[in-house]
């Protein structure tokens, strides 16, 4: 199973332990990864780690997370887990991309400077295109523009600099496609019409998702810790009620639950409480620990794997590599519907939860298409 445990701000922390009392070294922790690069520039204070899990399908693409990790070990574990996740996400999305990720250790509100970002850009450039970067927690399109002054291998830039703009638009669209496929598998028709959908977190992705759902005729209930986020949704859709917090939403009578806030949304208590028949949302790393996917299955809840349905943002930034076309990227994101159908079918065939089937399909594509690289061409 794909790990659900980076130590980043929106994910759970799970310590990777060695087999002896001595701490595990980088080679042991990074087992399965192709390359881990440590980058340091004392003058700017840059400390970064770039992890490349796989380039079997193409250059590794993944965002740069700028985060004040408590320890260097936390940063390493986060970047290793996240880079693996990107490889699976790109493979399942049908992209010719591998998986990588980078972390910059520090507080972005205090340590982020033009010089630091440009120093980082030079290290990314030094990898010669094996790794392409993008935005993540703590980095924004304007930061990518700075990095791009030193480096050709950057996506997620501002529209003014040839970038694709806000990736949450297609992320939400992709989640909606996955949800339609889950509705078809559950109720026989690919629509949320007349269903009650609870959206936890109505930020960048969640509020776009609410619009798709309302347009499809669903009854939507939302919650968010930020009153302004709820107010924005209700200004657009006055009929959408809100509840006080995620616990209240989970306890509501729902047909579909859409976690669109933080990782670890699906823990033992949530799974035991949910009345929803489907879980499908944008949040990364929703499964709080290994085994939750089985608990969901045992309760008859169809889980649409997070990294499958939230790949629209990756699809959007990946399209920049060919000169961005929103329509082309949208067509590709629409295919998340078909991929979700395939994953549910494989899950049934193999008698495994959809999360396991998604991993299998991604691994199969990495092996099958990756093998072609062994055919020599001049
Ligand atoms: N933006 C993308 O393109 C993209 C792509 C893939 C995955 N994701 C994932 O989707 C999720 C949402 O991303 P986003 O870009 O919309 O982020 P965001 O920060 O814009 O929105 C998250 C929202 O969740 C709310 N929130 C935080 N904690 C909460 C809590 N405990 N209870 C209720 N609400 C809470 C926040 O107030 C915010 O409004 C994240 O997990 C992100 O990693 C986003």
Image (spheres, rainbow, N blue to C red):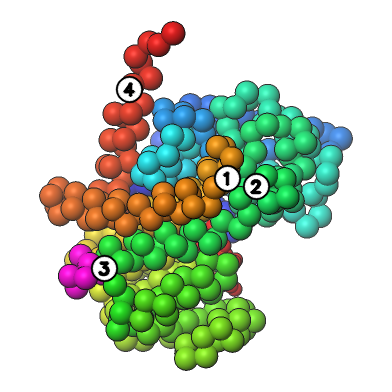
Residue at horizontal 51 percent and vertical 70 percent from the top: 208
N-terminal label among 3 and 2: 2
Query: Mark 2 near mark 1, Cβ–Cβ under 8 Å?
Result: yes
Q: Residue tagged by mark 3? A: 190
Question: Which circle's residue, 3 or 1, is located before the other in the chain?
Answer: 3
Q: CA distance from mark 3 to mark 4?
A: 35 Å
Report the residue at 41% width, 62% height from top.
175
Q: Earlier in the sequence, mark 3 or mark 4?
A: 3
Between residues 117 and 167, which one lies in front from this camera angle? 167
Lower sequence index among marks 2 and 4:
2
56 relative position to 67: left or right = left
Where is residue 232? Give x, y as percent. 60, 81
Task: Mark 1: give few (<14), some (14-19) or many (20+) Cα within 10 Å.
Answer: some
State the residue position of label 1.
324
The region drawn magenta spans: 183-189
Question: Which is more foreground, mark 4 or mark 1?
Answer: 1
Q: Nearer the viewer, mark 2 or mark 4?
A: 2
Residue at left offset 30%, top offset 84%: 194
Q: Of label 2 and label 1, which has the lower sequence position?
A: 2
Q: Depth-wise, is mark 3 or mark 4 nearer the camera? A: 3
Q: Mark 2 — residue?
A: 163
Measure the alpha-carbon separation of dots 3 and 1: 29 Å
């Amino acid at each position: 199973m794909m790990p659900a445990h980076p130590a980043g701000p929106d994910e759970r922390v799970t310590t990777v332990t060695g087999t002896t009392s001595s701490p595990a070294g980088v080679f042991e922790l990074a087992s399965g990864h192709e390359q881990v690069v440590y980058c340091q520039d004392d003058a700017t204070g840059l400390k970064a780690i770039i992890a490349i899990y796989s380039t079997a399908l193409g250059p590794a693409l993944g965002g740069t997370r700028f985060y004040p990790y408590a320890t260097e070990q936390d940063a390493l574990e986060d970047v290793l887990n996240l880079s693996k996740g990107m490889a699976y996400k790109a493979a399942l999305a049908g992209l010719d991309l591998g998986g990588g990720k980078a972390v910059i250790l520090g507080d972005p509100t205090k340590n982020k400077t033009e010089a630091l970002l440009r120093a980082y850009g030079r290290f990314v450039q030094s990898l010669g295109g094996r790794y392409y970067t993008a935005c993540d927690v703590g980095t924004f399109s304007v930061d990518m523009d700075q990095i791009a002054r030193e480096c050709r291998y950057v996506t997620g830039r501002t529209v003014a600099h040839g970038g694709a703009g806000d990736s949450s638009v297609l992320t939400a669209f992709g989640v909606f496609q996955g949800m339609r496929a889950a509705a078809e598998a559950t109720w026989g028709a690919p629509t949320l019409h007349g269903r009650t959908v609870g959206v936890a977190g109505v930020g960048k992705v969640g509020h776009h998702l609410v619009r798709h759902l309302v347009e499809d005729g669903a009854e939507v209930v939302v919650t968010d810790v930020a009153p302004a986020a709820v107010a924005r949704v209700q200004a657009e859709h006055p009929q959408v009620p809100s509840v006080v917090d995620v616990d209240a939403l989970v306890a509501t009578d729902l047909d579909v639950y859409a976690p669109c806030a933080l990782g670890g949304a699906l823990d033992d208590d949530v799974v035991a409480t949910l009345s929803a028949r489907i879980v499908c949302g944008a949040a990364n790393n929703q499964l709080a620990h290994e085994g939750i996917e089985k608990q969901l299955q045992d309760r008859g809840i169809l889980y649409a794997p997070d990294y499958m349905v939230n790949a629209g943002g990756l699809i959007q930034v990946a399209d920049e590599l060919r000169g961005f076309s929103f329509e082309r990227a949208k067509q590709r994101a629409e295919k998340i519907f078909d991929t979700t159908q395939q994953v549910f079918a494989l899950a049934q065939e193999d008698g495994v939860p959809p999360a396991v089937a998604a991993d299998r399909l991604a691994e199969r594509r990495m092996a099958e298409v990756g093998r072609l690289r062994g055919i020599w061409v001049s």
